[in-house]
Amino acid sequence: MIRSTVMFTAMVAAVLGAGPAAAQANCTHTFGSVMELTGPAGRFGQAASKSIELALRDLNAAGTFAGCALAVDLRDSQSQGTVAVDQAKQLVDVRRVPAIIGGIISAVSIPILTSVTASAGVVQISPASSSPTLTQLGRDGRSQGWFFRTITSDALQGVAAAKYALDSGIRRVSIVHVNNDFGVNMVREFSRYFTALGGVILTTVPYQPQQASYAPEVTRANRGNPDALYLVSYPGDGTSIARTWVQQGGVQRFLLNDGMNDASFIRDVGPQFLNAAIGTSSGTTPTASSTYFAEQYNAFAGPTFNAQAPAADRAFDATMILGLAIAHAGKFEAAAIRDSIRKVLDPQGEVIHAGQAGIRKALELIAAGKPVRYEGVIGPVQFDQNGDITGPFRKWAIRNGEIATVGQMSVEEVREVQGRLR
Amino acid sequence: MALDLATYLVFFLILALNYAVLCLGLNLQWGFTGLFNVGVAGFFAIGAYTSAILTGPPRPEAVGGFDLPVLIGWLGGTLAAGVAALGVGWATLRLRHDYLAITTFGIAVTIQLVALNEEWLTGGAFGIEAIPRPLAAWFTSPTQYNLFYLGLTLALVALVFWGLERLVRGPWGRLLRAIREDEVAAASLGKDVRTQRLIAFALGSAIMGLAGAHFATFMGFIAPESFLPVVTFQVWAMLILGGSGNNRGAVLGAILVWGLWSVAGVTVKALLPPDLQVRGAALQVVLIGVVLAGVLLIRPRGLMGEERAISPHTQATATASTAPSSTPASGGPDAR
Amino acid sequence: MMDLVWLTLPQVIANGLLQGSAIALGAIGLTLTYSILRFANFTHGETISWGGYFTLTALAALTPWIGGIGKWGGLTFGWGLVVALGVGVVGASLLALALDRLLFATLRRHGSAITLVIASFGASLALRNLIVFVYGPESVQFTRELVIADRWLGGLVRVTPDQLAVLGLSAALAVGLTVFLRFTTTGRAMRATAENPALAQITGIDTAHVVRTVWVLGAVLATLAGVFIGITAQLRPELGFDLLLPLFAAAILGGIGSVPGAMLGGLIVGLAESAAVEYLHAGYRNAVGFLVLIAILVIRPTGLFAARG
């Protein structure tokens, strides 16, 4: 009953959201998206897809893009590389889309890039694949400039986390991390700098996602009484691990990664156990965009989708950037869109935030030929020549069940730490 | 529009025929020999990784890439999967067939975890990238290249198909079927049942390895997530739906089931209201599951049943028991 | 460092037994259905998940009357859960019977064992994603209450009352079912059908009734497994499917059809996983159960408890 009410409300909201657009434009530009809607990464892709729809609602309500309303043809990769490339190829060849947003896991994003988008000359923006391989593909010239991602490099976040942990008085740490490219890379960078800066790592335990119980991993990590647990995970498995850690009497002090600053995580573990939990996220102290996104997401998507899911905020930004780039390009063509993507993040431009008012302002500026700088949910970012973004990190702590931002670390600061140890 | 569709179909067929090669390998094992191999993804992975390591560019922190020609990579992948299967088969082929299923499954899980954890060999969670494609420099457009690769793929399928047809229609094929139908009787006729089964198992797995090499070359990138158990189940669904014991059925099943996977999304999208597109994606997989089960309800022996390959005068009595169903039923009394 | 490593041994064993008891609960159901229905039934995993979600739904719907999950002493649940579990069991049983009626009954008459396996794979795919559609992809919790584990053996082992309850219940179920199969008419009819269905039918056993009974029994055990994992960890749409392979390993390890075998098999798989994480490589946790299984099968090809060859 509750469910159907929610769905009905969402449906009404969607219709209302789409209403003004229909009044303004009588044509539609459809871009593509290949997301993990089902399979192991399904919950991330679903949350991200709702963000795309939310951003589209705002964009279409605010104006037209290259003369038309925007729409997305959303395809499911089923978390499988073969299905992903098949769907991406359908989008490119049959639907003739000039841009694709996706995918979440590298095993989906990389095959789409190497066997579909790069060769066909189609823009691809991944909101979540953080694998260093994608940087390498850019460096080798194999992505030919068609690939962008709205996720910061794990390497930098690992360094930021190491510095933040030591500054917070954590010297001896045990690590439990998800055993995938994200977790492995993050922990590798963290460990290198944490030990070089004088910290001690007691144990590093990789975990396989989706186990019924994480007691064995927790027992192993708890060996030798660490000062804190560095948990590199997602809400869900991460919740289960943190609960088991507390149950087994582990020290109630956590270092957490981007994505764990999540209301459902805090609620399900219990705020009373998380008062000494700290973590890092990409982005700055809360901005107009991040506040807007936090307010709007669940009102739009309904309670079953998670605004803090790893790709939700970044898929929103990816769509916003794509939409503004289409407006900037003035035509719905891949090469023009590609060249405009960096222009809507112009460091000299006027700052634009998420929301319909912001988009209207951006469209006016673009029409007047003035530079704009979209500052999204993940903060002020810039794409480098490989399509990677660099941006500041936010240091946060959990206090009485609320996430409090306690500071910020600029890219320069992170690079300085890196440089000191090279 | 028609041309666009054709471009897509070329791509679709390359992937579908990749599954067809896997399916042909499985058909030799299950359809003709009655070996219940649920480790398809494992042998597929061995072929893919071997070929990627042999043909790929050098990697700074891992073994290989040896930059060898693609042909060597494909042969290497085939051989590696075959040799691995010899080892696996030697230890497990004497098991009852559903016990064999779970052990081969376990081996596939182990192989996938080796791919994930042994970074020095497989690139670990990061996988292997920049796997070269043969003659890529000769073509100017991706469509032309895909057309060429489809030709290559068709030749590969034809070669495997022709080779298997020759084998299974010859005396060895009859021997395999005899073993499948009644192991004890075959043994009592002085046939070395164990060796023959082992050869069939290794040969089938080698074909799966070849499919893996073909896959890695086409995708240009492989990672552990490409070799999860779902691949094994897809291939089984293809074989059983197409009709096991029939090589044409195996190829047909691969194309149809991959087609089902490919169009289910668009079909479900068309039926759902816009705001249910995200949530409703789950229904596309529901649809795939229902269609799989539904087709089997209507045609329990698959779309193409097993062909009659027994001498005509025994046909009348034999047809009733030619399908793999007459191998010892799973569970139950045969083991007691 | 060496002494420190072995100091965790009691906890490693406890973890293994606790994990193993959850696997055992599922494996007992699987081994019974496997021995009588004669095919590897993938939908058993989905029965586990659906049983858990049915119970969760009942708990939410009945809260005005039962006042929530309840509380027994140090446990995080009480009468409320028992009532909801009753509803969940009925739901899962109806699901299992419906599947048999719609799909498996027909295939038993016309198809081969492998057709049944692949059809059950298709049905499992559909049922699993139906959960995603209805309940969403995120994991859910039965209760947020978190009890810090009691210390035992001078602090070497930490176990929560919930975990002890699951361990005790699995053991009690294994004993109860063994007695049921050995000493009741229905139990004997089930064993006879497992041994030889044709002969059982000739001797006047209502095999259709036996098949229905085993579906219901399997669903009851599956729901229990789903709910206990929900209580000690969390519910996810893929819960049952991800658990299915350790379940198969446990059932085959014990010998198909053997209830004590499935119990022992579950415990062995649980212990192997726990020990692998602690002493070998945590990244290979999912493979260890299988490797133990393969090693045992190579030595004893019919499993530990299989009936006479």
Image (cartoon, rainbow, N blue to C red):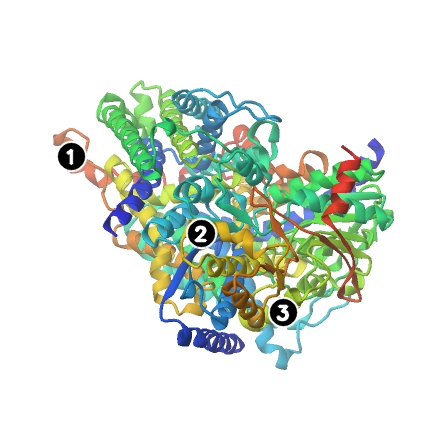
Q: Is B172 on the left or on the right of A122, as rendered? A: left
Q: Give the residue number, with chain letter if any, for mark 2.
A: A336
Q: Is A241 on the left or on the right of C5, as rendered? A: left
- In the rendered image, residue C144, in percent from the top left (x then y), is placed at 70, 65
What SS does tag 2 mark?
helix
Residue drawn 70% across and 44% down?
A: A156
Vertical side of B228 occupied by C233: above or below: below
Front one among A271 and B109 = A271
Front of the two marks 1 and 3: 3
Q: Is A268 on the left or on the right of A276, as rendered? A: left
**Chain bearing mark 3:** A
Residue A287, quarter of the rendered image: bottom right
Q: How crowded is mark 3: few (under 14 residues within 10 Å), some or many (20 or more)?
A: some
Front one among A383 and C122 = A383
What SS does tag 1 mark?
helix
Q: Do discs 2 and 1 share a chain?
A: no
Q: Give the residue number, with chain letter if any, for mark 3.
A: A292
Q: Is A422 on the left or on the right of A27, as rendered? A: right
Residue drawn 27% across and 49% down?
A: B5
* Outermost residue toward the left in this view: B313
Q: Give the residue number, with chain letter if any, for mark 1.
A: B315
- In the rendered image, residue A375, in percent from the top left (x then y), is placed at 63, 60
